[in-house]
Image (spheres, helix red, strand yellow):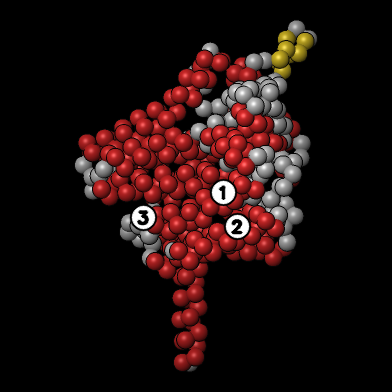
Amino acid sequence: MKKIFCLALCIRVATVFAGIGYDRDLSFWDMRDYDRHALSLLNGNGFTNGTSYSSRPPVYPFLLAVTYFFFGHHYHPIRLFQSLLDSLSIVFLFFINRRFFSRRVCFLAALFCTFHPILVFYCGNILTETTSLFLLSGVILVCLRAAEKESVGWEALGGILFGLLLLTKSSLLPVFPFMAIWMLGIRRIKVNKRLKLLATFTLCTALVIAPWSIRNYRIHHAFIPLTTSSGTSLWDANNPKALEAPEVIGLQADWIMVGNVFKEEGGKKIRLSEVEGDRYLVKRAFAFQKSLLLDRPGTFLLRLFRKFLAAWSFHPGQHPVEYLLFFLAYTLALGGWILSLRQRPKPLLHYFLILQYLLTALVYYGRAKYRVPIEPYVMVFTALGCLVCLQFLRKAFSLRGKL
């Protein structure tokens, strides 16, 4: 794996210095917002972007602030650091996959991840995706180790890493119930030990999140465990404007900045507080979904189908050859997933991670950006499907030669 690690790191570092495949000028709002939070921390103004105080989880802005402190307000240091994290993630994923698949499958999956354009290009973006992939792979690897050793110490480390993951990318919170189901379903461990592992994992996760939640309560006088951006994200994908352009149904359509939510009362527009605005948008989004389901069930189902397609979409402007390669990769992944259903042990964590992504995408929306943390878990099925196809072709041609 040393060669794979070095190759992955060289590719990512070269891509960063070449300026290929990422937003160099931070034109995307999320990038500028993380940058604002980091600069606010450095300037002694606290954790804010000027309009909101809890719209982002804290780990990534703090990481940016640390790199700015040591290297100045430059983006290449964090891009290079993310290249290192992504390369380490591939190594972690190899050892995760090795619990369930052959060495050949794991090596090919690592090779696919090494050259995967989405994984490579996001190392250069000032976004949480690469860091989230690293932390998530660390959580999975540590929890597998805890299950093998029946060790509370390893599970405590897993809970700490999971807490950091949620404080980096709060949208991965749905991973928790699936992790809990997996821990409770480990048959070779006694029930009381399973409960102990889950309790330790949960407690350590809560302890990591607690200081941030307490800080939010002191600011907003309301229980905000992670962020105040759930309403913005939910409304963004579930609002009447999403029906006006059928070609983008399932993608974002009406984004409203946290802290800039207005409500009409008595013919006047009233600006709501950060917490009130978040809850207001959540209510409006669910009301829209409910009315659509009751009044236009066909359109509701069509939106779900298009959200599913959007969850596996690629970046716009790609060459037709790239689309063909991605289509082939996901087709092989589907075949690999079907084949994996017959093996022992089954890679349940892989299934759960992909399932939680799809469920989240159906509620919100999906795109290549949100798929980064789970994309490597798809690639192992692509590798499995690819090897089986190659074996089939080799047998077919050998038989044809004999005939």
Give the residue pinned by disc 2.
12
Give the residue pinned by disc 3.
346
- Of residues 190 and 116, the one nearer the viewer is 116
Kindly identify which numbered label has been placed on residue 82: 1
Q: Is residue 207 visible?
A: yes
Cα distance, mark 2 to mark 1? 9 Å
Count of numbered labels shown in the rendering: 3
Quadrant of residue 304 within the rendered picture = top right
SS under mark 1: helix
In primary-sequence order, the first of circles 3 and 1 is: 1
Asked if disc 2 and disc 1 are in contact, CB closer than 8 Å, the reply is yes
How crowded is the residue under tag 2: few (<14 C-alpha within 10 Å), some, or many (20+)? many
Estimate the x, y position of residue 160 in percent, counting from the top left: 40, 36
- Of residues 355 and 213, the one nearer the viewer is 213
Residue at image coords 55%, 59%: 9
Identified by mark 1, the residue type is Gln
Q: In the rendered view, does 263 fall on the left or right side of 98?
A: right
Decide: is 320 above or below 188: below
Residue at image coords 69%, 36%: 32
Estimate the x, y position of residue 5 in percent, counting from the top left: 49, 61
Identified by mark 2, the residue type is Arg
SS under mark 3: loop
Cα distance, mark 3 to mark 1? 31 Å
Q: In the rendered view, does 151 fall on the left or right side of 27?
A: left
Kindly identify which numbered label has been placed on residue 199: none
- Of residues 320 and 79, the one nearer the viewer is 79
Q: Is residue 237 visible?
A: no
